[in-house]
Image: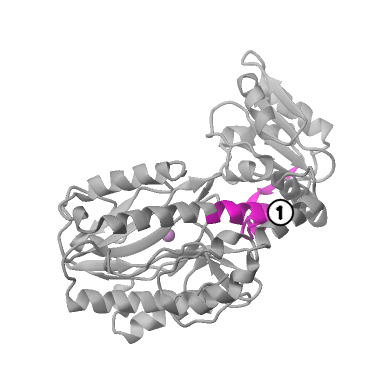
Amino acid sequence: MTESEDDSDAGESLGYSESAVTSDDSDTAAASDTAESSDTTESSDTAAASDTAESSDTSPQERRTREVQRRLRERGDGAVVLFPSHNMAYTTGFTEEPGERHLLAFLPAVGEPVFLVPALSGEQVRRATWIDDVRTWDDEADPAERVAAIVEELDLDGGRLLVDDTMHARFTHDLRAAAPDATFGLASEVLSQLRVRKDDAEIDALRRAGAVADEVIAELRATGETVVGQTEAELAAEIERKLAAHGGTGVSFEVIVGSGPNGAMPHHTHGDREIRAGEPVVLDFGTRVDGYPSDQTRTVVFGGEPDEQVRAVHDVVRRAQQAGVAAVEPGVTAADADEAARSVIEDAGYGEAFVHRTGHGVGLDVHEEPYIVAGNDRELEPGMVFSVEPGVYLDGEFGVRIEDLVVVTEDGCERLNHSDRGLVAIE
Ligand code: CO
């Protein structure tokens, strides 16, 4: 659902989940939208049911792999070969840091995928993946020989192999040696088009990650002026604890607590400056749920009275963010969505102070396609997820940024963050 913060009527529910319906957006103007869409509460059941019908024993990872294979056949390519990466997690379900041992997943255009993994990871991989054919190699063995055997068995030499974009050169080298007549491309040629449109399982995880961020910022607001006098680092540590307490895993990126003039630096993380009464604090953080991150920003005054300029700038940014969200629907370009937010800030005379693009795609990577930026003529499509996060940064004074993630629906978008966007912690 596009719950509109102010007066927008853009979009309706995709019907992914009931959580969107319980949006507690603090703005009363959203009430009509919320009421209107309350009849979508059946949606999570429906979504679950259709998932089940489609594939009673097929995991999302297997469905994605089958689609990769279909696209490979369509393109006439031979296989995608992955090593530990988000592409591997996306298609196989197995997550691991890249290492020096050969750990490769072969997704051939035709036939069944093959995993080649170090013996010490065998059990871990088998538990994590839907792929049946998991072959292990011992530390005494020569893994390059095993690679060559799989290449021969799958008949990959002479074809085109799409290797993981971040694969270490030593593994690519072994593949080249094993398939001297093959040509090579990048896995992203097939996978980025798939990954840019999130499926139900991904949107569900992103929504839950967003809900954790919502809960944490709501708790912080409720503590009000007790935050005054804490350092940015203390507050950041508190945010990390709360994210974990609400079920998140780690942080999506280093927590940003930009108080007063520090808020004017968009990528300031946190330091030992003490938060003062009356000043805005930029709070930008997220956590992961089932591997998917949240990324939300609010700018909050915790105690005392903000001055007129702070109020005015916050109002401009909030209207810009609303305009950006309202502009999002299929067929609109990323550049148009950027312009919708940017023009509000420019019209208010702060164009020079909005020093970054309006947003970035979010999936397994916190920054991925699509980028919501001038010049990007890519059209938005249902299932795309990205941030809408305009900001105004006044050097030496303060900064304001407001950010929600949105998922593009069939006819608009749905926010994945619903917490209060107001300036003052406790109104
Ligand atoms: Co962001």
Q: Is residue 193 above or below residue 83?
A: below
Dot 1 beta carbon under 8 Å from ligand 1: no
SS assignment for the magenta stretch, majority = helix
Q: Say which of 165 and 378 sits in front.
A: 378
Q: Where is residue 357 shown, x and y percent of the image?
A: 42, 69
Picture residue at 21% right of the left edge, 67% below the top = 398
| Drawn side of residue 203 relative to residue 231, left or right | right
For residue 381, say whether it is visible: no
State the quadrant of the N terminus.
Answer: bottom right
| Drawn side of residue 393 relative to residue 336, left or right | left
User: In which image quadrant can residue 82 be found?
Assistant: top right
Picture residue at 48% right of the left edge, 76% below the top = 31
Q: Where is residue 306 shown, x and y percent of the image?
A: 19, 71
Whether 197 is among the magenta residues is yes
State the quadrant of the C terminus.
Answer: bottom left
User: In which image quadrant can residue 49 be found?
Assistant: bottom right
Q: Which residue, given by chain and number where applicable, does mark 1 sit on? A: 48
Residue segment shown in magenta: 182-207
Q: Say which of 403 and 215 sits in front.
A: 215
Secondary structure of the residue carrying tag 1 is helix
Q: Determine the residue located farthest toward the top in the rendered image.
A: 140
Q: Quadrant of ligand 1?
A: bottom left
Three-letter residue code for mark 1:
Ala
Picture residue at 38% right of the left edge, 52% below the top = 216
Q: Is residue 149 above or below residue 244?
A: above
The number of numbered badges drawn on the structure is: 1
Q: Where is residue 380 shown, x and y percent of the image?
A: 60, 71
Q: Where is residue 35 shown, x and y percent of the image?
A: 55, 74
Whether 3 is among the magenta residues is no
Q: How is the image coloured?
A: one colour
For residue 2, say whether it is visible: yes
